[in-house]
Amino acid sequence: MTADEVRQITDSRVLAAMAHPLRRRLMDALKVHGPSTASSLATITGQAIGNVSHHLHVLGDCGLIEEAPELARDRRERWWRLVTRGLRWSSADFRDDPATAAVADAAESLNLDHHVQQVRGWFAAGDEDKTHWRDCTFAMDQWLHLTPEELREVGEEINELLERWRRQQTPDAAGRRPVFVFAYGVPGKP
């Protein structure tokens, strides 16, 4: 796999490892900031270096991240990077066994919690941080009448749009900062 691919998760151990809240934050930090050391990730996440190091090793053991030895200035310094730019999984891949189905269900719930936490973090930010971004953030929802195939198509179109924007990003451009965008499409009842 290359760093620009999306990995399909079919192993419940890997799914459980990446669903852990701190590990998820570490992977997000690596996605946003690029290869990093445990020390810099500890600063970003506000966690102890030993705790971060432990969780980096768990992620590494599952093949979600890897060491980047070419970035080290000496033999003691360890850099880490994502193996792929994204992950996806389908609960259907885990339904054959009740234990793995429970892992998939928990991972989906934790994933939603993580997404909502990102938005709530913005709402809780101080006014100074919001000043330049107030008129451009968005929230939307729609009730659509779709077949499963049509819902899949909507998801693919949204993903293509976000992928187009991801590819044209220049992280160091003036005024740019990490922006979290997510969308869900699920059957529901009003």
Image: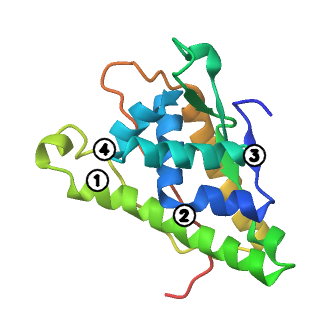
Amino acid beneath label 1: Trp
Mark toward the viewer: 2 or 4? 2
Residue at the spot of label 4: 136
Task: Identify the residue at image location x=42%, y=37%.
Answer: 41
Mark 1 = which residue? 122
Task: Tell me which label, 3 or 4, sits earlier in the chain.
Answer: 3
- Residue type, mark 3 in image: Arg
Secondary structure at numbered mark 3: strand
Residue at numbered disc 2: 111
94 up-or-down from 45: above or below: below
**Disc sitting over residue 34 in the figure:** none
Looking at marks 2 and 1 on the same chain, the residue that comes earlier in the sequence is marked by 2
Residue for point 69% across, 79% down: 102
Q: Earlier in the sequence, mark 2 or mark 3?
A: 3
Label 3 or label 4, whichever lies nearer to me, is: 3
What is the C-alpha distance between the residues marked 3 and 4?
31 Å
- At 51% from the left and 42% from the top, the residue drawn is 53
- Above or below, 28 against 151 in this view is above
Question: x, y percentage for residue 26?
Answer: 49, 45
Residue 74: % across, % down: 53, 13
Query: Is residue 29 in sight in this rendering?
Result: yes
> In the image, residue 93 lies at what x, y percent?
83, 68
Q: Earlier in the sequence, mark 1 or mark 4?
A: 1
Of helix, strand and loop, which one carries label 1? Answer: helix
Give the alpha-carbon distance from disc 1 to disc 3, as whole Å: 28 Å
Residue where numbered disc 3 is placed: 7
